[in-house]
Image: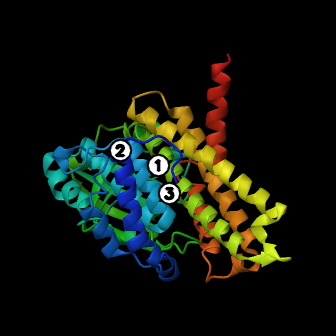
Amino acid sequence: MTSIFLADEQELFQQSVRQFVEREIVPRAEEFDRHGIFPHDVFKRMGELGYYGLRYPEEVGGQGADFVTTCLLYEELARGSLTVAAICAMQALMGTYFVFKYGTEAQKQAYLAPALRGEKVGTFAITEPNAGSDLGGITTIARRDGGSWVLRGTKTWITSAPVADFITVGAKTSEDRGLENIALFLVDTTTPGFSVGKPIEKLGTRSSLTSEIALDNVRLPEDALLGAEGEGVKNVGGILSEIRVMTGALSVGLAQAALEAAGRYANEREAFGQPIARHQAIAFKLADMATQLHAARLMTYDAAWRIDHDLEVTREAAMCKLQASETAAMVADEATRIFGSYGFAMEFPAQRFFRDARFLLSGGGTSEILRMLIGREVARTYR
């Protein structure tokens, strides 16, 4: 349960999402994990329910909800299946935001509107084989050619790439190294020269398909540039806090699912004449799991509230993501220990939570990068 104060409409929304998850996601969570097939029917259903447009204004087909409400969506979806939650998060934020913010009216009609309805899949591509956290090292190049842009390069770890209809791609408009030369481009995946490369077989979130993409002299119209030249990193940075808090909400949802499963098992499993939940060793584990989860949840919704009220949130978003993702990994790990040998068995969900939790440790910044950022912010405070 969410340990925060919610408005009546937020509670009603949370309950409606929970009902959807219990009815349509939880019974298929193992199927999504085992077969690793993109769930087109669930993807379309989430569009019909308005989940992708939740944060966008009504004039573009959205719901105009606040970010706290959006985080409730991500938490509840992740509680049912992190795979489904990750698909939704990509579509609802990075996959569509830059078209919403910088696209032409024609682009919004062609890509944003159908994406919010769940009729098209959008995604985001900036990571490269040799450039992850170090964005200044990307080598994908965009050069002008008359009234067109021509893109050449390779991206990797691109969520939903095998099924995407359009992708926002980060590329350099100069050969010089540095962040100031990066721009964002809208690429229709039917454009000649675009291809989906090697799929990445992942430990978890297996139905959230991931692969490389290749751009072999992909020719784009001039208005494919989303935002100004050289402002790609700045424009991504504009939603980086939202990305981190969103990842916090996903982490809270997964940790909640792991805690619930471990708690139920600890009450059912008996050893030495009583449920193992009554043994101090297990009770202490449950106590630490619940305490860390409570802290992560409060930090997540505090940061979401700050975003809704236009307050400075850079440090809080980084702290939230750090605490929540590490908590998810810890809670999932402890759940496998409480399950004992059955934590290693595929028929029980503990192993899925353990595997899926690793996904959360990288998105939005690794724990090591976040600690560097937070440390600098703290040091600056006490100069």
How much space separates mark 3 and mark 2, taking CA atoms?
A: 44 Å
Label 2: few (<14), some (14–19) or many (≥20) C-alpha neighbours in 10 Å: few
Question: Is residue 146 among the parts visible in the rendering?
Answer: no
Image vertical order of residue 240 relative to residue 351, above or below? above
Disc nearer the start of the sequence (1/2) = 2
Badge 1: residue crowd in 10 Å (few <14, some 14–19, many ≥20): many
Helix, strand or loop for disc 2: helix
Which amino acid is tagged 1? Met
- Percent from the top left, x then y, of residue 1? 52, 54
Residue under numbered circle 2: 8
Check whether the beta carbons of the residues at disc 1 and disc 3 lie within 8 A of each other: no
Q: Which residue is mark 1?
A: 246
Q: Earlier in the sequence, mark 1 or mark 3?
A: 3
- Are there few (<14), some (14-19), or many (20+) residues within 10 Å of tag 3? many
| Total tally of numbered discs in the picture | 3
Front: mark 3 or 2: 2
At a point 25% along the width and 48% down the height, the residue shown is 63
Quarter of the image where one finds residue 174:
top left
Amino acid at pointer 3 = Glu
Find residue 110 and report its horizontal and vertical position in percent: 16, 58
Amino acid tagged 2:
Asp
Nearest the camera: 122 or 341?
341
**Is 250 in front, or is 200?**
250
Left or right: where 303 falls relative to 161? right
Location of residue 318 by image quarter: top right
